């Protein structure tokens, strides 16, 4: 499901809207100084914070003086500030613009700033000042979709659905898009429950598909990850909005059917192989480990490492 404007994002937008209304005045002064304030707005008021890469970041939401500033005065101040940062040897400028101050985007663009990314309540523009082509990293490149192959070893049945809004009705595993900050396994379990009503537990990661210029990803790249899940409820409660059909199908029937997608068929064969020869042959299992510098934790997925290899120090 596409995320809604919620929680802290919503609060920020509402606070900005309130400020915009309360601070409303003659914002768009025509000609003259191009500024509705009493004193002129200068480069020194566009305060930036240096970063460790030699760039500078300006967050317009933190500069109260901008409330009644018009775009012409802003452009003049920004141009002077950019000149100053250039002379100081800064390599880049990052400009964070809350959505309600979007009137400052066009003046910044006219000075060479480009969109780096946008969130629901703000945009980030950047300008490369260093030598040669920009070395600034891009923003998110992929969307992540996750499906759950929910396999019941006792009955050898697998949970499959047909999507409602697809051009062709083919059997596939229930799944959907990962939300920001959500673990892969949690997406699979959540999407399976939302679409089918089946409760399940993450077991392993089975496959990763990478596809570029994906129509369902607004032309960006798509990572589609299939997880093996173990069911612990069995009564289907179909989501009418997203699914047309849902059933527990014999795994061998899913392997044989033509009415499915190539990726579903391939993963069905993989599951059959795992069921017959041992799931350790196909599973990428997950372990949580501490990140070295940040104090955070991450999830690492790989084939299970035998215990004696966990302590082994070399080839001898
Ligand atoms: N090979 C396969 O078997 C298939 C793989 N996938 C993968 O699954 C992932 C996405 O799964 P989904 O089930 O599609 O996500 P999802 O379960 O999160 O559902 C997305 C919802 O958004 C709706 N939606 C999408 N675009 C919309 C638009 N422009 N306007 C209004 N509503 C819109 C859809 O109708 C759907 O209800 C992707 O990674 C995709 O590549 C999806 C279908 C088949
Ligand atoms: Mg879905």
Image: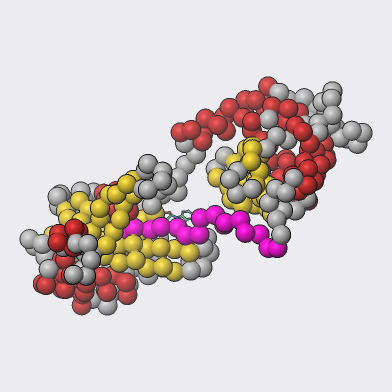
Identify the residue at image location x=10%, y=72%.
276
Q: Residue furthest right?
A: 32
Q: Residue furthest left?
A: 154
Counting from the top left corner in percent of width and height, residue 31 is at 91, 36
Q: Is residue 42 left or right of residue 164?
A: right
Residue 40 lies, with reference to residue 129, above or below; the image says above
Q: Is residue 304 visible in this depiction of the protein?
A: no
Counting from the top left corner in percent of width and height, residue 95 is at 66, 43
Quarter that holds the C terminus: bottom left
Identify the residue at image location x=41%, y=43%.
294
Quarter of the picture for ligand 1?
bottom left
Question: Which is nearer the eye, 194 or 184?
Answer: 184
Identify the residue at image location x=77%, y=33%.
44
Residue 265 lies, with reference to residue 86, above or below; the image says below
Question: Which is nearer the eye, 55 or 204?
Answer: 55
Question: Which is nearer the eye, 35 or 306?
Answer: 306
Which portion, as a residue range, is magenta?
Answer: 132-151
Whether residue 292 is in magenta: the answer is: no
Question: In terms of image quadrants, where is residue 279?
Answer: bottom left
Q: How is the image coloured?
A: secondary structure
Question: Which is nearer the eye, 87 or 159?
Answer: 87
Counting from the top left corner in percent of width and height, residue 153 is at 10, 62
Identify the residue at image location x=48%, y=64%.
221
Whether residue 135 is in magenta: the answer is: yes
């Amino acid at each position: 499901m596409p995320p809604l404007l919620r929680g802290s994002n919503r609060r920020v937008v509402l606070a900005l809207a309130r400020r915009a209304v309360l601070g409303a005045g003659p914002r768009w002064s025509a000609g003259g100084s191009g500024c509705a304030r009493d004193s002129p707005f200068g480069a020194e008021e566009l305060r930036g914070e240096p970063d460790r890469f030699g760039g500078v970041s300006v967050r317009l939401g933190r500069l109260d003086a901008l409330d009644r500033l018009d775009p012409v005065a802003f452009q003049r101040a920004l141009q002077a500030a950019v000149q100053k940062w250039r002379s100081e040897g800064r390599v880049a400028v990052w400009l964070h613009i809350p959505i309600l101050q979007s009137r400052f985007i066009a003046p910044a663009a006219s000075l060479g700033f480009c969109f780096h990314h946008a969130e629901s309540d703000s945009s980030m523009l950047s300008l490369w000042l260093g030598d040669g082509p920009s070395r600034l990293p891009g923003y998110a490149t992929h969307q992540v979709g996750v499906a759950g192959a929910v396999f019941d070893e006792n009955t050898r049945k697998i949970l499959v659905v047909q999507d409602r809004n697809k051009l062709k009705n083919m059997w596939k595993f229930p799944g959907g898009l990962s939300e920001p900050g959500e673990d892969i396994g949690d997406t699979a379990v959540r999407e399976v429950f939302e679409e089918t009503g089946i409760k399940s537990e993450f077991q392993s990661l089975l496959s990763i598909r990478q596809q570029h210029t994906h129509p369902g990803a607004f032309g960006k790249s798509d990572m589609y990850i299939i997880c093996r899940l173990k069911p612990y409820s069995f009564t289907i409660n179909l989501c009418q909005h997203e699914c047309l059909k849902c059933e527990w199908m014999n795994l061998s029937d899913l392997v044989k059917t033509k009415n499915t997608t190539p990726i579903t068929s391939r993963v069905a064969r993989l599951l059959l192989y795992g069921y017959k020869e041992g799931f350790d042959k196909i599973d990428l299992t997950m372990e949580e480990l501490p990140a070295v510098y940040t104090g955070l934790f991450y999830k690492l997925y790989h084939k299970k490492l035998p215990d004696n290899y966990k302590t082994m120090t070399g080839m001898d």
